[in-house]
Amino acid sequence: MADELLSEFATVEAAYGENDAASARERLSDMYAMFEKDFGAVPSVCARSPGRVNLIGEHIDYEGYGVLPMAIALDTVVAIRKNLSRDVITLRNTQSDTYGELTFPMDPDQHVDTGKHTWGNYVIGAYKGVFEYLKKHHPDKVPEPVGLDVLVDGRVPTGSGLSSSAAIVCSSAIAMLEVLGVPRLRKGEVAEFTALAERYVGVISGGMDQAISIMGKEGVAQLIEFNPVRASPVIIPDDSVFVIANSLTVSNKAESATGRYNLRVVECRLASAVLAKSLGVEKRKAIEYTTLKQVESLVDEWCLKKTEPLDQSMPNWCVAAVCDFLHEAPYSTREIEDILGCKVTELFDDKASKHVLDTFDSFKLHHRALHVYSEKQRVFDFAQICADTRYDADKARQLLGSLMDMSHTSCSTSYECSSPELDALVKVAKDNGALGSRLTGAGWGGCTVSLVKKDMVGTFLKQVKEQYYGPLLKSGRIDEASMDVTLFASPPASGGGILNNNV
């Protein structure tokens, strides 16, 4: 799938499915009308890219491990045209009361001010990413920068953990490639460079969100693997439904990255080097181990020397190595520097990571590595269960649900990326028949995903609405009109692509 060219949807049904086609047509018609009113002409290109729900495999993509998400129906659509009369990029949003008009230079080398977070940074990050990638990999395809008029309509709730950021970055990149006349690129290429482009807004993205947003496929989840990025379909057991529930606690990655998301990335990087040193690598070589996946080869050598079998309480030898070599107490900056024989700043060359090191002096290496190595095993087991014909659907659902529960516990206790609201929502889901429930996305707020048998979905939705959202509805924190994007069942949806002008 990564080698396929970017999709072009010939019909609304192809992009959104039969059930959602009518509402999608109305939405696109409204966008065209608004675009013409605002810019005095119709758009020449429309592109879409969806949000996603990660079924299992949290915070391990940036460590090089595979994850198992699916694209969802909620998406972002970008309408665009060239404007040769103005040397600027003009951005407007259908939610103009919340997201005001912005203008940016058309210089692709412009600086993105991450200290002044705006919604437009995601669009300009995509713009920079397009040119940066083409200059490096397709120098013969680099277009001339021109003025652009852009209208964005996002339906993925921000801060929900459903990757609204990837949806806007990917849809913007797809639209820009098309309007600038760049020959169609492969899906894998676009997934790779949009992951890097999101770093322009100050987030060290791992690549899962962009990969599934580009390579999602209707009806199936995807096992996304990296280096190079690729996708393999995973067939979920019959009569299995995933229900997404928004905790209504917002956690925007770009705005809270330093003390949360980026801190975890730094802790994993430090854990990789310290664990490599503990497994016998000399100090100056140990700092070359940048991900926990790279340390696996050292663990393989170590376990071959072990005379006793793997403790049955351990999911794999990597977890055993963490328990043997990384102490549970937090590591100070000085302790890490003494172990590695260098300043921790020598391990990083990006601004976001250096900001983390300037801000913190305590790093939980044991707990972060423990989560990564156990979670990567759960992803493998999840995919294996889905493919194993020995299990009937009921047994498979039971096993998958157990993996989801273990994942949430690990996210909550080892990676510490849950929140009281997420934990409460998981409990409500489990109390009302979910076979498994867990936070999804970066965490610290956002959504949960729960596995429910198809014939129980109606009752499940009713009970969760009453027990979790009832008090919030009464207090006015949320209104009834918002419930359809707050608590919903979603089948796996199509990935991003060009919306043909005839739709």
Image (tube, rainbow, N blue to C red):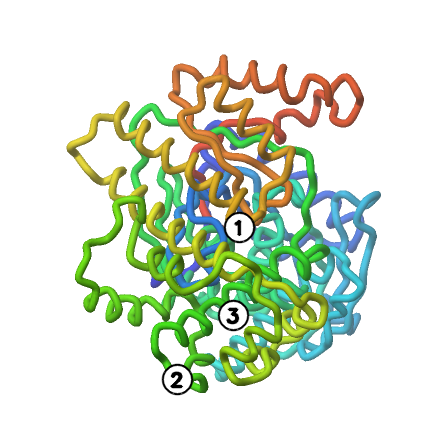
Instruction: Please name whichever residue, 113 or 295, is drawn nearer the observer in this view of the structure.
Output: 295
The earlier-in-sequence mark between 1 and 3 is 3
**Hey, what amino acid is under mark 2?**
Glu
**Distance from the alpha carbon under mark 2 to that under mark 3:** 15 Å
Instruction: Please name whichever residue, 82 or 94, is drawn nearer the observer in this view of the structure.
Output: 94
Pointer 2 local density, CA inside 10 Å: few below 14, some 14–19, many at least 20: few
Q: Position of residue 180 (x, y in %)?
A: 59, 69
> Residues at badges 2 and 1 in contact (C-beta under 8 Å)?
no
Foreground label between 2 and 1: 2
Q: Position of residue 11 (x, y in %)?
A: 47, 41
The earlier-in-sequence mark between 2 and 1 is 2
Q: Which residue is mark 3?
A: 270
Foreground label between 2 and 3: 2
Q: Which residue is mark 1?
A: 415
Q: Secondary structure at mark 3?
A: helix
Q: Secondary structure at mark 2?
A: loop
Q: Residue 335 falls in which quadrant of the image?
A: bottom right
Q: Secondary structure at mark 1?
A: loop
**Hey, what amino acid is under mark 1?**
Tyr
Q: Position of residue 119 (x, y in %)?
A: 73, 55
